Image (tube, rainbow, N blue to C red):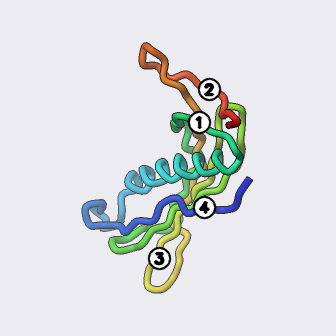
Amino acid sequence: MSERYLAIKVVMMPRDLNPAQTIFGGVLLSYIDQAAAIGARHEINLLGSACDLIVTVAMNKIEFHKPVLVGDVVSFRTRPVRLGRTSITMHVAVEAERGGQALDVTEAEVTMVSVVKQPDGTLKPTPIRRE
């Protein structure tokens, strides 16, 4: 499995502030979810495999180490932790660039599952397949 992958990089904006004047944890969770999906697809492609649709089934071990502030340039880097038959677990490390420093602010593990949409609209796990 590969090394860390820069899945998303974003500037934090005033619209994402909570009453304490830091970025809402839920905003970071949303980006973590997106980064995990992007990183999972990247990893699956590197392995010569594919999946049509991938969804989040679990966010585990989420740790907020330091607050994120407006104006921080935040990087969401992923690395694979485990690859199963239908799932992949990604570690997402969140780093904020602030005042010339790179600060480790948050981390999480996210498990994604490869699925296919059934005719009735339900999602069914499907193997991550080789191309």
Q: Mark 1 points at which residue?
A: 51
Q: Name the residue under label 4.
A: 5
Mark in the foreground, 2 or 3: 2
In the image, residue 122 above or below residue 58: above
Q: Mark 3 points at which residue?
A: 97
CA separation, marks 2 and 4? 25 Å
- Which amino acid is tagged 3? Glu
- Which amino acid is tagged 4? Tyr
Mark in the foreground, 1 or 3: 1
In the image, residue 32 above or below residue 93: above
Q: Residues within 10 Å of mark 3 (few under 14, many from 20)?
A: some
- Which amino acid is tagged 1? Cys
Q: Which residue is drawn at 26% across and 66% down?
A: 14
Question: Is residue 128 toward the left or the right of residue 74 in the image?
Answer: right
Q: Residue at x 67, y 51 (%)?
A: 46
Query: Nearest the camera: 74 or 9?
Result: 9
Mark in the foreground, 1 or 4: 1
CA separation, marks 1 and 4? 19 Å
Secondary structure beneath dot 3 equals strand
Q: Residues within 10 Å of mark 1 (few under 14, many from 20)?
A: many
Q: Residue at x 66, y 34 (%)?
A: 128
Mark in the foreground, 2 or 1: 1
Q: Which of marks 4 and 3 is nearer the N terminus?
A: 4
Question: Is residue 76 toward the left or the right of residue 22 in the image?
Answer: right
Disc number placed over residue 126 in the picture, else none: 2
Q: Which of marks 2 and 4 is nearer the N terminus?
A: 4
Q: Earlier in the sequence, mark 1 or mark 4?
A: 4
- Which amino acid is tagged 2? Thr
